Amino acid sequence: MFWKLIAKILPSRIVYAHCDVPCGIYDPKPAQIAAQTMLKMVQKINEQAASGTHDDEGENSFIRMVMTKEEHGRILKHELSVLWSDYFKPEHLEKYPDLHDKFWKTMKLASEVKQTVDETAAQELIEAVDEIAKVFEETKTASSG
């Protein structure tokens, strides 16, 4: 009874955050997996559209594919935002002066893939995320060597 009263007086809510402590636990792999998942969902949606499946089961599958694509788009944008804002530092921009532009264009491309079922755009997204991952690996290697 006491805890129910406390919960009513001081309601809590779930908060999600990445720590701002330089923990060194950064990795572009979740963004890469999310981009690959988005491409796969675009392909599956297009395959289903071509097959003409319009029954309840097909509709359910379509909704699930769209939801999966949306969720992985959110994951991708979150993971890239963390890398962009927390991992990359001014010294990285000196070596890669187009880094902000790469991130900005990749985030915009992620939005486009979320909004469409354009397989070419989804493939371009994978390539853009892979390019950021390559820069990440180069900076990680340079800082540990």
Image (spheres, helix red, strand yellow):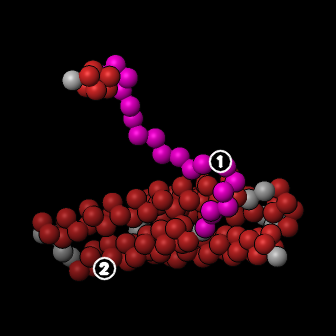
The answer to which image quadrant residue 1 occupies is: top left
Location of residue 2 in the rendering, given as x and y in whole percent from the top left corner: 26, 22
Q: Residue at x 19, y 65 (%)?
A: 59
In the shown orientation, is residue 28 left or right of residue 101?
left
- The amino acid beneath tag 1 is Asp
**In the drawing, what numbered circle is on residue 20?**
1
Quadrant containing the C terminus is bottom right
Residue 47 against residue 23 in the figure, above or below:
below
Is residue 127 covered in magenta? no
Q: Residue at x 85, y 67 (%)?
A: 95
Q: Find residue 50 and report its image quarter.
A: bottom left
Identify the residue at image location x=49%, y=72%: 33
Residue at coordinates 47% horizontally, 68% vertically from top-left?
A: 34
Direction from residue 34 to residue 129 in the image, left or right = right
**Residue 32 visible, this angle:** yes
The earlier-in-sequence mark between 1 and 2 is 1
Instruction: Name the outermost residue toward the front.
Output: 2
Pinpoint residue 101: horizontal percent, then vertical percent. 72, 60
